[in-house]
Amino acid sequence: MTEDYVRRKPGMGIASRFTLGLGLVASVVAIAATFLLLNGIDEIGGTIATDAQVEMASETALLRSQSAERTGDLLMTRHLSQSDAVVQVGDGKVIVNGETQDTRVFLASPANKGGPNSISEEFFAPIDSMASASAKIISLVVLVFGAFVLIVVIMASLTARRITTPLNEMVEDVLAISRGRLDTRIGAENAVGEVAHLATAVERMVDDLVESQEQAQELADSLSETANLRDVQRRLKPMDIPVVNGWQVSSFVLEAEGPGTGDFVDAMYEEENGFTTAWVGTPSMSGLAGALIMTMTRSYLRVRLLGGMALAESIDKANFALHRDLAKGMYCTIMATRFNPQSGEAEIVSAGHQSPAVRFDAESGEMRTLQPNGIALGFDAGPIFRNSIETLQLQLKVGDALFMYSPSAAACENSAGKALGEKGVYSLAKIAIEEGLEVMQDRLLKYLDHNTHPDLGFVLIRSKK
């Protein structure tokens, strides 16, 4: 795009070019016209003088041969020749063969003469002889200045065409772009002056508009995809877990702005045996891929658990299916707990989940972290994954609680840039255990103070005293 902009060299402005060009042409034509006019007038003047002399001699000879006589008074104009002879000129009438006709009379007196009694030579000339001479001069002047005007008009027309042709090209290109041909470039290759500046500005404007349109479309697509992903995540809600023997299971996901990281929670209740299973999961990818991993992980786990398999075995079968179906680099980590509300027996399994579970022991009043071994779902087809899985057996008593959360919770920062850290997470766990997840959520939001954060999942299992 930059190269296209640089290719045009605006140079001198249109007004300057037009004025200078027209001035130069007008000057050249004016000089040529003046030269032609002077030469023409000189030639016509010589011809006129000769013709006048011929006409005068002819008219004088003719009238004298016919014994013409002047009649009436003449209004004469006195002229002094180069030899100081006095020449009087006037129009009058003469009688020729009894008829009167108009003629021009010239009375020439010797040098320093010309008085009333001076002897003068009389000459005659046709009255219209000078009219034909004037017509020739006028014709010459009209012809020269007509040619001058014609050349100036042609020059102005060529200059106007030089200006309007690039403008018309620009109009056609802009119209093509408006019809959807966004790959059209602004032409006007021969543009100069302000038109070249205009072509560059229009091309840059079109590029900016196209870029803005593409960004707007990408944003719209992104927002649409985000909305669809969020809709998928919200529809895959955990089951409603009944309170059995005073044990309550609650969970929530604090959603990030945009598509988020795809962290999720799930919980299910098996009516046949009364077992409750809950887990927190984190896919390796965000966006559509993360939603796909989340959906597949939930589905595979639920099918196995509802089929009556133990927790570790269900996770092993889900791993096999995910390794088969997911592309390389796609995986999911989970921290899962399955317990019997009647007996308080529970087991915890981690599949590569980096955040430990937090257990509150009501008898000692202490909070302890639990981190079973295990690698993420989808890494290995079977043997390595199966050998890495560790199951922790627990006995939950009245007043005890179990808290699970997303690994990225500890890295969340407030508006001052301070990370929550492990201590902050344990403080949240204590608040959740003592006052419930809703109160913990309010405290977490207050700490974040509208600062950006990823999706965060939380699960709480506690006994109501």
Image (spheres, helix red, strand yellow):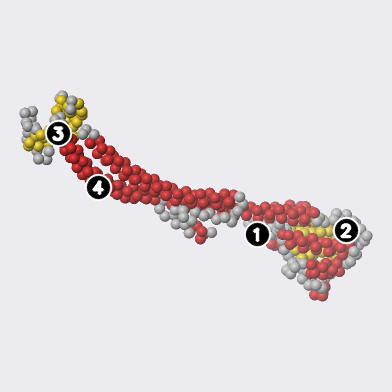
Q: CA distance from mark 2 to mark 3?
A: 151 Å
Please name the amino acid that badge 3 sits on. Ser
What secondary structure is marked by label 3? Answer: helix
User: Most extreme residue toward the right, as rendered?
Assistant: 272
Q: Residue shown at 72%/63% (left/top)?
A: 285
Circle nearer the viewer, 2 or 3 = 3
Q: CA distance from mark 2 to mark 1?
A: 39 Å
* Dot placed on the residue nearer the N-terminal end, 1 or 3: 3
Please name the amino acid that badge 4 sits on. Asn
Q: Residue shown at 65%/53% (left/top)?
A: 217
* Dot placed on the residue nearer the N-terminal end, 1 or 4: 4
What secondary structure is marked by label 1? Answer: loop
- Residue 181, given in percent of the width and then of the height, sits at 60, 53
Image-quadrant location for residue 384: bottom right
- Residue 267, given in percent of the width and then of the height, sits at 83, 59
The tag on residue 418 is: 1
Q: Could you tell whether 183 is left or right of 269 in the image?
A: left
Q: CA distance from mark 1 to mark 4?
A: 98 Å
Q: Could you tell whether 376 is left or right of 35 in the image?
A: right
Circle nearer the viewer, 1 or 3 = 3
Which residue position holds label 4?
A: 39
The tag on residue 65 is: 3
- Residue 103, given in percent of the width and then of the height, sits at 19, 31
Which residue position holds label 2?
A: 269
What secondary structure is marked by label 2? Answer: strand
Q: Residue shown at 31%/41% (left/top)?
A: 142
Q: Quadrant of the C terminus?
A: bottom right
Q: CA distance from mark 4 to mark 2?
A: 119 Å
Please name the amino acid that badge 1 sits on. Lys
Q: As rendered, which of 88 and 338 lies closer to the eye?
A: 88
